[in-house]
Image (cartoon, coloured by chain):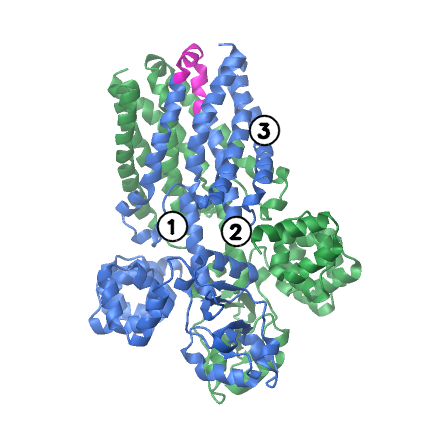
Chain colours: A blue, B green
C-alpha cells in the first residue's frame, strides 16, 4: 500500500465516522504509522481513532506523538484512561509532557501518579528544559563492578523486563559511583566466569544531567553510542540517554536551525497541525525587525539621489546587485552555521574561516562580475556595466566575510549561531552593498 | 581539558614533530576524538599521528574518518598496513570507501582482500550509490525460527564476536527467507524453553537493499529501531542497517538539504579540510544561474523607467520591498522543504499547504505594510508610502505562495525539493514583485 493511499484512508474513515473501518485500519498498521496519521489531524479528530485502539497499543502510539498532540488526546480521555497512560509512560517522556503542558493538565497528571512514579517525574522535572536530565531514563539495570559475567547476565534476565533499555548497562562501585558501562552484546559474548570489572569500558563517555541535551546527542552520534551514561556532579549514575531520544533531540535541533536560518522561530509541532496564526507568530518577529533595518537601504538610496538622477541606469541594477550579495552571504552563513552545529568549526577557527571565505567570495565575485559585465554591456552600455561588475566583486567578497564572521561572533558571545539568519545577512549586505555600489559609481563615472 | 586546548595540542605537536608528545596525546584520547582531530588536518599531516597509533586502535580511528581522509591516509601507508586495515574494516564501510576512491586505490584495495571479503565487498558495490545496500552490514548472526530461545542465545554467544551487531537478530525460515527480527534484549529476558517463533516480531519493518538509504534511515528514526532488516526482492535476508550508519545518512542528508537551501551544492567533507576552489565550485553554479535570471529584474526596471523618472522616490524603496518579499518566500520554502524531508507534508497536501501559506503571507504582509507605511510616510510622504504598503501586502502573499508551491512541485516531478533554494525563490519573487510594485504605483499615483 502506498503512503498516499494509507493517509487518505484514515482521515476519510474518521470523517465518515466509520468505526469498523477505523478498527480495521488500526489493526493493519504499526504504532508509529498510526501516530504519524494522528499527528496530521486536529486534536479533536484524533481522539476518535485513539479511543478505538487496543489497550496494549494505546501507550505505544501515545509515546510516538508530539507533546501538543498528547495534550489534546489527554483532554479527550476519561480519568481512568488518562491516569493509566501517564502511569505507564516512560519517565522521561512523561516528564517532558508534563513540563510542557498547561498547569491544569500537569496538576491532574501529577496527582494521579503512584508515589514512586511521581517522585521519578519530579526529579526529572528538576533539570532545566532541554538538558540531558529531561531526556534520560532512570529505568535501567545497574550492575555492581564485583559481579561475575554469568551472575550479571542473570540479573539482567531477571530485571530487564522493567527497564526501558538494557543494551547499555551501567557498572557502578559502592555509592552508585559510575565505573563505566558494558554493552549487552559484550556481556552475552563474554565467558560466564570473567569479572565484570575486567570487561567494563571505563573510557565510555559520560555526561552530566545538567548539560544541554543537544551536545550529548551530538557526542553519541560522533562516538556511535546506543546509550550514554548520565551522572551527577559527584559522578553518581543517574540514568541513560538512549539513541531514540538522542535522534529526537538532533532532529528537533536541525529543524530549529533550519527555521532560524530562514529568519523564523522554530514551531516544533507537525507542520500540518500548526495553525496559521502560530506560523505568523513564529515568522513575524524577524521580518518586522528586518523591514525596520531595511530603512537603512532607503536612507542610502536617498543619500545618493543625485547620483541616481544623473545616471538612472544605475537604479536598474540595484535588485541584481543586492540579490547577488545576499545570495553569497547566505551561502557563507549557512555553511558556517552548519559546520558549527556539527562541530566541524570552532570559535578559535575564526580568522582562518574568514580568510577562507573572503577568498571564496572574491573568486565568486570575479566569476559573477564577468556575467554582470556581459549582461550590463548589452542592456545599458559598458560604463555602467563596468561599475556594476566592480561592485559585484566588492559586494561578494564583503558578503562572504559578513556571512561567515557573524555566526562565529554569535557563538563567541554565547548566542545560537543559527539566529544569524540568511535574511539578516542579506539585509546587512543590502545597505552596505549599496554604499559600495554608489561610491564606485561616483569614482568611475566621475559624478 | 577543554575542546579548544585539546585541538591546539595535536596540530602543534605534529607541527613540532614531537613524536613522544603525539604518542602521549593519542593515548589520552578516544578513537572518535582522534578521528575528529585528524579530519581537521591536511592528509599529509594526518598520516604522522596515524602511524603512531597502537595497532589495535588504528582500525577504530580509521573507520571514523571521512572517505576522502581515509584515502589520504591509505596513500601514506605501506602495503602490509594498507591491506591489513582494509581486510579488517566493516564490509559496508569498506564498500563505501572503495566505491568513492579513485580507480588506482580501488584496484589495489580489492586485489589485497581475502576471497571471502572480496566477494562480500563486490556484492555490496553491486547496489546503487546511496542505496541501503551500500550501508548494510552482512555480518550478523542469523537465527532459524525453529530454535528454542536458550539454544538461540547459545548461538549468539558463540558467533556474536564476529558480527558487526547483535542487538537485532534476523529470524529466518528455510531458504533464508526473513520471518522477522528479535532483539537481543527480548532474547535475554525470555525463558530458555520458549520457541523463537513465538517471540519473533513479524511486524518489524524491513526494506529492500535497492531502496534509498535516506528513506530507510528516516523509517528507523520514526520507528525507533536500533537496526533495520534488509531483504532482496524475494524477501531473503541480506543484512542489517545499523543506527550509526542511519545517523550518518541522516546527518549527511540534512547537511545537503541545508547547503542546497542556500543555493550551494553539498561538499560532503569536513569544512576545514575543503579547499577554497572546491567551495567556489560548489557555490558558483546556482549563483551564476541566478545572476542571469536576475536580468529579468533589470528588464522590469527598464520597462518602468518612465514611472521611475516621474516619481524617483519609488526607486528608494526597491531594496526594502524585494528584500521583504525574498525573506517571506525563503521562510515558506524552508518550512516546506523541511516538512517534506521529515515526512510531515506530502505531495497530495499541495492545495492545503498553499492555501495555508497564502493566508500566512497575507497576514504577514498586512503587519509589515503597517511598518512600511509608517517608515515611508516619514521619509517620502504618504502617497508613495501607500504604494509601498499595498505592494508589501501583495508581494508577501505572492512570495509565500511561490515559496511553498515550488518545493512541492519539485517533489511531484521527482526533483529533490531542497534544490528549490531560498535564493531561487527570492530571485523569482524579485522580478515578479517589481512588476506588482510598479503596476500598483501607476494605478494609485495615476502615472
* Badge number at residue A342: 2
State how far apart marks 1 and 2 are (Cα).
30 Å
Location of the N terminus of chain B (image quadrant): bottom right
The residue tagged 1 is B347
Looking at the rendering, the stretch of residues picked out in magenta corresponds to A303-320
Q: Residue at x 50, y 28 (%)?
A: B292
Between B304 and A104, the residue placed more toward the observer is A104
Q: Which chain does the numbered disc 2 sit on?
A: A
Residue A10 as seen in the image, left or right of residue A325: left
Q: Residue at x 42, y 51 (%)?
A: A255
Location of the C terminus of chain B (image quadrant): top left
State how far apart marks 1 and 3 are (Cα).
37 Å
Residue A215 as seen in the image, left or right of residue B433: right
- Nearer the observer: mark 1 or 2; the answer is 2
Residue B376 among magenta residues: no
Residue A308 among magenta residues: yes
Q: Position of residue A424 (x, y in %)?
A: 42, 36
Q: Which chain does the numbered disc 1 sit on?
A: B
Q: Position of residue B71 (x, y in %)?
A: 69, 53
Residue B301 as seen in the image, left or right of residue A284: right
Q: Position of residue B59 (x, y in %)?
A: 68, 63
Determine contact: label 3, label 2, CB under 8 Å.
no
In the image, is residue B11 above or below residue B293?
below
The residue tagged 3 is A367
Give the class, few, some or many, for how many residues have Cα within 10 Å of label 2's Cα (few <14, many ≥20).
some
Amino acid at each position: 500500500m502506498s503512503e498516499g493511499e494509507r493517509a487518505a484512508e484514515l482521515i476519510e474513515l474518521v470523517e465518515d465516522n466509520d468505526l469498523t473501518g477505523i478498527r480495521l485500519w488500526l489493526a493493519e498498521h504499526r504504532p508509529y504509522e498510526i501516530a504519524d496519521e494522528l499527528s496530521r489531524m486536529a486534536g479533536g479528530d484524533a481522539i476518535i481513532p485513539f479511543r478505538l485502539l487496543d489497550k496494549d497499543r494505546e501507550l505505544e502510539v501515545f509515546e510516538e506523538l508530539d507533546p501538543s498532540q498528547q495534550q489534546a488526546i489527554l483532554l479527550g480521555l476519561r480519568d481512568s484512561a488518562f491516569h493509566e497512560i501517564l502511569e505507564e509512560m516512560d519517565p522521561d517522556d512523561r516528564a517532558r509532557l508534563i513540563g510542557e503542558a498547561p498547569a491544569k493538565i500537569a496538576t491532574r497528571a501529577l496527582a494521579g501518579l503512584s508515589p514512586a512514579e511521581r517522585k521519578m517525574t519530579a526529579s526529572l522535572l528538576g533539570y532545566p528544559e532541554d538538558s540531558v536530565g529531561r531526556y534520560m531514563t532512570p529505568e535501567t539495570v545497574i550492575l555492581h563492578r564485583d559481579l561475575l559475567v554469568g551472575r550479571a547476565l542473570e540479573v539482567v534476565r531477571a530485571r530487564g523486563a522493567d527497564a526501558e533499555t538494557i543494551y547499555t548497562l551501567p557498572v557502578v562501585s559502592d555509592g552508585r559511583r559510575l565505573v563505566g558501562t558494558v554493552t549487552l552484546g559484550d556481556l552475552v559474548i563474554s565467558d560466564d566466569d570473567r569479572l565484570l570489572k575486567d570487561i567494563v569500558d571505563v573510557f565510555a563517555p559520560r555526561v552530566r544531567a545538567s548539560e544541554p541535551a543537544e551536545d550529548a546527542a551530538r557526542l553519541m552520534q560522533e562516538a556511535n553510542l546506543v546509550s550514554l551514561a548520565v551522572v551527577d556532579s559527584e559522578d553518581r549514575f543517574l540514568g541513560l540517554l538512549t539513541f531514540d531520544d538522542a535522534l529526537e533531540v538532533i532532529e528537533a535541533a536541525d529543524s530549529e536551525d533550519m527555521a532560524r536560518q530562514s529568519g523564523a522561530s522554530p514551531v516544533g509541532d507537525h507542520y500540518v497541525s500548526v495553525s496559521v496564526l502560530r506560523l505568523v507568530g513564529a515568522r513575524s518577529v524577524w521580518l518586522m525587525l528586518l523591514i525596520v533595518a531595511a530603512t537603512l537601504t532607503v536612507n542610502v538610496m536617498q543619500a545618493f539621489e543625485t547620483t541616481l538622477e544623473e545616471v538612472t541606469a544605475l537604479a536598474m541594477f540595484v535588485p541584481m546587485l543586492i540579490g547577488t550579495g545576499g545570495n553569497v552571504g547566505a551561502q557563507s552563513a549557512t555553511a558556517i552555521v552548519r559546520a558549527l552545529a556539527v562541530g566541524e568549526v570552532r570559535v578559535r577557527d575564526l580568522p582562518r574561516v574568514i580568510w577562507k571565505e573572503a577568498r571564496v567570495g572574491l573568486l565568486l565575485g570575479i566569476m559573477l562580475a564577468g556575467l554582470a559585465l556581459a549582461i550590463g554591456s548589452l542592456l545599458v552600455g559598458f560604463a555602467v556595466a563596468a561599475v556594476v561588475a566592480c561592485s559585484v566583486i566588492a559586494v561578494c567578497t564583503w558578503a562572504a566575510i559578513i556571512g561567515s564572521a557573524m555566526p562565529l561572533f554569535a557563538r563567541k558571545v554565547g548566542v545560537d549561531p543559527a539566529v544569524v539568519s540568511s535574511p539578516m545577512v542579506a539585509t546587512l549586505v543590502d545597505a552596505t552593498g549599496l554604499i559600495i555600489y554608489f561610491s564606485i559609481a561616483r569614482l568611475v563615472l566621475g559624478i
